[in-house]
Every structure is written in structure tokens, then in C-alpha cells.
Amino acid sequence: MDLLSLLYAFLLFTPALAIWPRPRNLTTGSTPLRLSSSFAIKLSGISQVPQDLTDAIQRTTTFLKTDKLQALVPDRGASSSSTVKSAGTLQSLTVKLSQSSGSVKSISADATAGLGVANESYTLQIPASGGTATLTASSALGLFRGLTTFGQLWYDLDGTTYLLNAPIQITDSPSYPYRGFMLDTSRNYFPVDDIKRTLDAMSWVKINHFHWHVVDSQSFPLVVPGFEELSQKGAYSSSEVYTPDNIKDIVAYAAARGIDIMIEVDTPGHTAVISKSHPEHVACPEATPWSSFANEPPAGQLRLTSSATTQFTVNLFKAVSSMFPSKLLSTGGDELNTNCYSKDAQTQQDLKSQGKTLEQALDTFTQATHSALRTAGKTPVVWEGAPQSYQAVRLTLTSSIEMALEHTVKLGNDTVVLVWISSDHVAAVAQKGFRLIHAASDFFYLDCGGGGWVGDNINGNSWCDPFKTWQKSYSFNPTAGLTSAQAKLVVGGQQLLWTEQSGPSNLDSIAWPRAASSAELFWSGPGGDVRTALPRLHDVAYRFIQRGVKAIPLQPRWRLRVLLAVRDGVFRYTGVLLNWEILGFWMKGLAIAGVGLGSLLAYVRIFRNR
């Protein structure tokens, strides 16, 4: 097939919309539609409408008016002006339940009901004739996911909100029940407004779990009723805390956006800051050299051999459990330094008097804390361990033990394991029969590539180099190397931001739009093409910016303009060839930009009818 025939063949393909994550089933046409100036979203047949559903409808209505996102083409849609002006109008969107009862739980209740309990599926129909579109789901949460998709379909041209692809038919549901984003607020503090903005961004790409690593060795900003001394002595300042009222506010804000908050209080390691208020419970607090006692400074971990310390931790977990409605709660369990305990006189005395090994003492401690969680209706979540051959990479991990793989602790069958050190460990966790969440540093760590931060090695790199691009996480296969039975243990995955070198000033730019890549991976499933995903992810970034999230560019605008110019310079949205003589010119431009014929054809297909 010659080049002209090949290009023409691609013109016949159905144009893509910039929906993120991509729906399970999507069909489109080529009819333009405008939103009517009196457009309204109407509820039908739902008795006792939950307030958070009403609020979600209002937010969607507002975004349709305020996004003002122009089409990502060189003329920003101007060449479609006459088509848009003469297009039919969509007067309304009817939102209704698929079942006949008409009663519905709130979005918040669905979001916090438990892992995979709520139904997030929805169906969206937009007719080419305009009039009324229909959104149907069996739950408020499903309706909310559909509203999120509906808001991504539209562009602005001189004050007119339009699309070019009606009729649109979408049937959608997630591949995995857990789609997460983790934020560490211990290394550096993040104000409540930053957390809320992050929750907003998560909801726009259907991320449904906020893994909140709220405390660590560096600071304890969580104000826990009955344990206020921990934050009084352990927070960076009295203003850099999360009060119980803050927590209620954040939990409610997240739940109304379809997000469950999994809180993490990492124990028994990563607890040096507790020594500020309870020195009796912490071994080797701020011991030096820190590299002999911890994976990063400051050193210090709970004296897990002490019955008093175990009871203190149990009571702490009971108090924290009451602050968060989620059924999931992480007790951490990673990077426990054995040298610290070997040098701690009280720990050694306790082990001798109890006739236990350190592993046995760890098991006793874990059984007590996890039992307390189960009594409170929680499912324990832990970090996985690492073979000793890999641990050497992580500084002093040769002298540490981890929760799921490198110990004799009897974890309950209900335990969920976060696989973090390497994706190579997924099969080992699955072989033990645990449900697992993908969080591997070699794919999903957003902080990798920032260089060493301790300050005493001018050539130092971060331990998890290199930088993890969005393409890297997008390429991940959640079931690689697993049997069909083991694949069922995968409940989802997340991207993670450890904040040794991040704070409020760069939160958005570190996270977005990269974190959206795993949102699509775990909603739509693996196998997505990075070439066709790229223009849609550009749209995500630009729409985020319009909504106040400072997402960073994925490419220089020059390269984007060269790619988009294929459409404006060679083809109209109708698919009619404009000028074959300039094809050679554009091919040369694409060659300069480093784009091959395969990419050219992909972009022709993507941007046709935009």
C-alpha cells in the first residue's frame, strides 16, 4: 500500500475523544453538537436525592461553564467555527437509576462501603439529534463517574460549548476496585487546601482511594484524641497539624468525590518522632550514624518487645480507627532495622526474659495490633518485604526485615499487601495467597530521579532512579507472571509521592498529569497504547490547569504543534484532503520532531474530526 492510500485508510477510523480513563466501550459519530444556553442536568425517578449527588451535579454544571478548554489543535478549533454555529443543541442531561426502586445511597456511603462493594458502572448516551442525553447507573457513585466523563467531552469556541462526535454511546466500569494515590505528609506538611485540591484532581480521573501516609519518623501532624501529646511534641509546628475537625472535613470532602481514605500509621518502624513525647516506647531514637540504624534519618522505632509499648500502639490504632470510616487501615510494617534492636538494651533484656526471638516478638506485636483493627471493623494493610539480595540496594536494608515476605509473622488471610520495593516481588506475595495492591517503586514512585537529598554526597542519586515517566507506569501489566487464580488477588494499584523533596510548592507538578496514567491503567486495564494515550493525556493536563491544578507539560508546545499541524495542514475534520503538495513539507517537519510514519498515522487517526 502506498503512503497516500495508507493515510486515506486511517481517515476512515472512528475519531477518539479525550476521555480519561478510556471507557470500556465507546462508540462515536461525526455530528457536531452545542450545549444549549439553557442546558440543565435533571434527575429522574430518584427519591430522596443524596445531597452529595446534588452537589456533584452542580459542580459538573459549573465546569461546563467555566472550563473554557479550547480544542488542542493549532487554531484551537477556529476552523470548525461554521460547523459549530450551525450545529444542533443538547438541551439537557437526564440522570437516572437503572433499577426501578428509585432509592439510592449517597456517593459518600458508596465510596466508603468497602473494597469493591459499590457498583461504579454507568451508561451514557448522547444522541446526534441533540435534545436530551441520558446517564444511567445503579448507584450514586456510578452516576458520579458518568458525570465525570460527561464533563470531559466538551470544548469551548468563542463562548460556545461544543463537541464534534455525536452520537456518543458509552458503557463503562472499572477493571479494578482499588485505584489509588499515596501522599506522604510527614516529611513535609501539606495544608488542608492542598489535600482537597489533590482529591479534586483524583476524582476527575476516577481515582477512588487516597492512601494517606500521615505520620513517620520526621513528624507526627495527626492530632489523635487521647494522644494529643504525639502531635504537640511531634508536629513541625502547632499550625502544621491535622485536627479532628480537619480530618472530618477531609474525609467528607473525599467521600463526596467518590474517594475512600486509607490512613497509614507505619509501625513498628518509622516511629522516631514518638520519642519526643514517649521516649520509653522508642529504641535508638535519633541514633548515629543514622545509616546503621535506619534507612533514612532520623533513626528510631517502637520497642515491640515491650508489653507497655504494644498496648500503647493498640490503643493508638483504636483511636485512629475511629477517625476514619474506611474499612482499610495500613499498619505499615516496612524497613524494620534489626541492628537498632540488637543495640537496644531494653529490647535485648525483654527478649531474654520472654524467651523469644525478634521474629517471635514481632509476631506478638503484629497479632495484637491487627486484632485491634479487626475488632474495629478494619482490614489490615501492610507493605511487602524483600529478598536480601535486593535489600542491599536500599541503603541498610540488609539489616532490616519486612512485613509480608521476610519474617515468620502469621498475617491473617484478609490482609492486603502493598508491593512496593519491586514489581518482581508480586508473584511471591500472590503465592502466599494475599490480596495485593501494586505500588512498585520501579513503576509507580513519583519521587524517583530527584537525586540524593541527605546532602553529603554531591554525586548521589535517589535510591529508586531513574525518573518514572507516565509511559513507564502506563505500560505496567498488573497480572504479568501470575496464574489465573493469582491474578484474582490483584485488587488494583496506585502511584505514590514520598515527600523528602516535595511540598506544597511542587505538589501539583510532581503528581500531575503523571498520576493519571495509573488511573487509566487500573480503570481501563492494561494494554493501552502510549501513542494514542498521549493526546488524551495532554487534554487532561490542560483541563486540570483550567480547573486550578498546576499540571506540568508533557512535551514542548512546539512538538505538540507540529503533531497537531498534521490535521490542520493536511486534513480537515471532514477527512477531505486539502493539499497533497504540502505533505512532503509536513513529513520533513515531523522528521525534525523525531516522529516516524507510524506516529504520523496514529496522530492522523487521533485528531481527525477533533
Image (cartoon, rainbow, N blue to C red):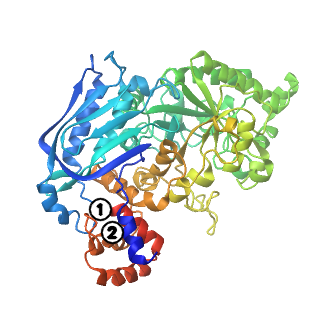
For disc 2, the marked residue is 564
Q: Amino acid at mark 2?
A: Leu
For disc 1, the marked residue is 72
Report the residue at 69% width, 35% height from top.
485
Q: Secondary structure at mark 2?
A: helix
Report the residue at 16% width, 59% height from top.
83
Q: Is residue 21 shown left or right of residue 429?
A: left
The front one of 456 and 585 is 585
Quadrant of res 384: top right
C-beta proximity under 8 Å, tags 2 and 1 = yes
Mark 2 residue crowding within 10 angstroms, few (<14) / some (14–19) / many (20+): many
The front one of 149 and 573 is 573
Q: Amino acid at mark 1?
A: Leu
Report the residue at 60% width, 58% height from top.
454
- Where 578 falls versus 237 (above or below)? below
The front one of 39 and 224 is 39
Mark nearer the N terminus (2 vs 1): 1
